[in-house]
Image (cartoon, coloured by chain):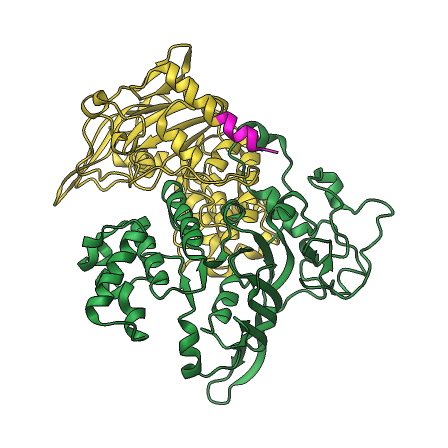
Amino acid sequence: MALLEVNDLKTYFQTDDGIVKAVDGVSFSVEKGKTLGIVGESGSGKSVTCLTIMGLNSKKNTITSGEALFNGENLLTAGSRRLREIRGNDIAMIFQDPMTSLNPVHSIGAQLVEAVQLHRDVSKKVARARAVELLKAVGIPRAERRVDDYPHQFSGGMRQRVMIAMALVNDPDLLIADEPTTALDVTTQAQIMNLIKRLQDDFGSAIIVITHDLGVVAEAADDVLVMYAAEVAEQAPVEKLFNRPFHPYTWGLLGSLPRLDIEVERLVQIPGQPPSLLRPPSGCRFHPRCPYVMDKCKQVDPPLVAISDDSDHLQACHLDEETKDREAKKLLESTMAQAS
Amino acid sequence: MAEDLLVVEDVKKHFPVTRGIIFQKQVGAVKAVDGVSFTVKSGETLGIVGESGCGKSTLARCIMRLFDTTDGKIVFDGRDITKLSRANMRPIRREMMMIFQDPYASLNPRKRVGQIVGEALEVHKLGTASETKRRVQELLEVVGLNPEHYNRFPHEFSGGQRQRIGVARALAINPKLIVCDEPVSALDVSVQAQILNLLEDLQQDFGLTYIFIAHDLNVVRHISDRVLVMYLGKVVELAPKAELYDQPKHPYTGALLSAVPIADPERGRARQPIVLEGDVPSPLNPPSACNFHPRCPRFQAGHCDVVDPPLYPFGDGHIAACHYPLERWPLAADEFRKPAAGHPPAETETSAVS
C-alpha cells in the first residue's frame, strides 16, 4: 500500500467572481522512501493540492472532494484535532519563503521546542536537546549557541535549514517541500537539495517536492507530475518523462528552458498566458496555446490515460501516439545534437 | 572590430557604516563594489552573474549613475560620465535605460500604460502629445502587446505582460545601452522564454547593447556573448561565453556551474556537484587577500590568504583572479580539492584587462 494515495482530488474556491477550480481531479500516490516531483507554472494548482492534503485551506470558502489516504486514513474527512496530530508529526511541510515562515519574535530554539512538545510528552530539556541535535543534523555550525538566536540572525540558506530541522523534528513519514529552494542562490540550493536527499536516505521518509524548476525535478524526483491549469497533463517516472515526453505542454516546458549544458539558438516559446481558472477554456485546457490543436481538443477534455506500451506513463492529450513519438524524438534529437 | 560603448575602470562603491546619532562617526564601510573593470562593446551582450549580495545590482546602478561611485571611472560612448552634474547627465540618460527585476514593483500602479511608457519622451521633450501617443502605441506593438491597451493600468496585466511594458519603456527613447537587472527571474519558464526571445529580437532590430544581470546561469549562457562572474564586489572571472562555460578557470565559477541542476535525469545525476560550504561572507569585513579563500576547495594557506590574486590572462579575453586556476573541466570532486601535484601557481604578472 502506498504511503499517500490521492484520488480524484478537487478543490474549488468560492469567490465573488464565481467558483475557481484550483485543483480539478488530481490523482497520484507516493511510496515510502520515494520522491514525487510536482511541476507546473504559477497558478497551476501545485501548492493548493498540497495545502488541501494538509488540511490548511480556509474552511469557509472551500469545497473539496475526492480522497487523500495517508496510511489508509482519509485526511479530507479527518477532524481538525486529528489533523493537528498528524501535521508536524507524520506529515511535515517546508514552505517556500524562509524569510516569512519563521516567527521573528521567538528564538529558533523556542520554535523548535514548541514543535517537539506539541507531539511528544517530554520535558523542555529533552526537547531542547532534540532541537540542538537536529540543527546539527542540518549542518548549522555551533548549534548549541545558535539555538538561542533569532531568525533575523540567520541568512536565507540557514533559515531554510532551520525550517527543514523543524519539519524533521518528529521524524515525519512524509515531507512536503513547497518550492524549497526557489528563494535561494544556486550554491545554497545545491546545499539544501543535498541535505534533503541525505535526510531521506537516513530517515526513509517519502518526499513531495513542488517546484517550477525542471532541473531540480530531474535531479531529485523519482516520479513526476506535470500540472497545467489545475489538472494533471502528464505523469511518469522521471527518466521516462525526460526521455520520452508525451504531452505538448511538457515539450513546451522542456523547449523553453535555457540550459547550461546545451547551446540553443532560440528558445521554443509557448505562446500566450496560462488561462484563468475562473473560466477555463473548453475541452483540453491547453488547447488555446497548443501548436497541435485539433477540433476535438476544443470540445472534449482528454482523460488521463496510460500510453499503450507503458502502464506507468500517463498523459492527457488527444494527439495520436505515432505523432507524439515522432515529435518527442525530434525534440530529444535536437537537444542531443546540440549537447557537446 | 566594434568600438567600446562602455568602459568601466576600477569602479568602487563603498557604503559608509556610521555610529552615533548627532556626531556620526564612520566605523567601517560595506565594500559593495570593490575595484571592477570591464568594457562593453557596441552591440554585444555582457552577462553578469553572482550570488545575492555580490554587488551586481550596485554595479548596475553605478553605471546608470543612480549611485555616485566612490572611486574609479565610467566612460560611456567616449565620454567620462563619472562626475557629470545632473543637468549634464540628462542628455546622456537618453542613451541608457534600465529594465528592472520585479514587474510588479517597477510600474507605478496609479499611472496608465501610456503614461508609463511615454514618460521618458515627455521628460526629454521629444515630440507633441499626439506624436508621443503614436510612438507609445508603436512601442506596445513592438513588444507584443495590444496598442489598444494604451489606457489600461498595470494591475490589468499578468507578470509577463508587465515585463513587456518595462521593455517598451526602456525602448521609448531609442537608447544605445539597456541594463537589464534580473529581468526574467520573477517569471515562469514559458513566459521567461517569451521575454528572452523578445530581448534578442529587439537587439537585432535596433542594434542594442545589453548588460544582463542574473543569478540564473542557464539564462545568462543563453543570452550573453561574454560573461562576468562577481564575488563579494570583485570580478573573479570574465570570458567569452563558450570559454567560461566549457573551460572555467576560477574555482568559484566551477562551483557555480556544478551547482546548477541539469534538466536531464541521466546526465544530471552522473555528475558530481562541488558543494560550497557556508555562506557568502559579509562585505563589511571581507576575508583577507583572495576573498573566496575561506570557501575555496583549492585554498593554499600562506598564499591565497596573503596575496590578493590579480586577474591573470588565459588568452582570448579570458581573465580570472586565481593563483591556482582549474587545469581542465569538468574535474572530479576529489581532483577539485587540491591543485595537481607540481601544478605551478599562475605566474605573477600584471593583469591585462581586455
Image: A28 above or below B81:
above
Q: Which residues are magenta?
A: A332-340
Of A228 and B291, nearer the camera is: A228
Q: Is residue A5 visible?
A: no
User: Is residue B322 found left or right of B131 in the rendered image?
Assistant: right
Q: B169 or B214: which is nearer to us?
A: B169
Q: Residue furthest right?
A: B342
Across and down, in percent, residue B151 comes to: 18, 59
Q: Colour of chain B?
A: green
Relative placement, left or right, of B68 versus B135 is right
Q: Residue at x 56, y 78 (%)?
A: B70
Q: Is residue A339 magenta?
A: yes
Which chain is rendered yellow in the image? A
Looking at the image, residue B224 lies above or below residue A211: below
Q: Judge whether residue A212 is colored magenta.
A: no
Toward the top, the furthest residue is A309
Viewer-side residue, A192 vs A315: A315
Taking the spot 70% from the left edge, 50% from the top edge, the residue there is: B249
In this image, B338 relative to A124: left or right? Answer: right
Q: Quadrant of the N terminus of chain A?
A: top left
Instruction: Give how far across and how far down residue A124 sits, in percent.
Output: 47, 48
Q: Is residue A261 shown left or right of residue A251?
A: right
State the predominant SS element of the stretch in magenta: helix
For the image, the number of numbered tags is 0
Residue B160: x percent and y percent? 32, 49
Image location (x, y in percent) of residue A97: 41, 50
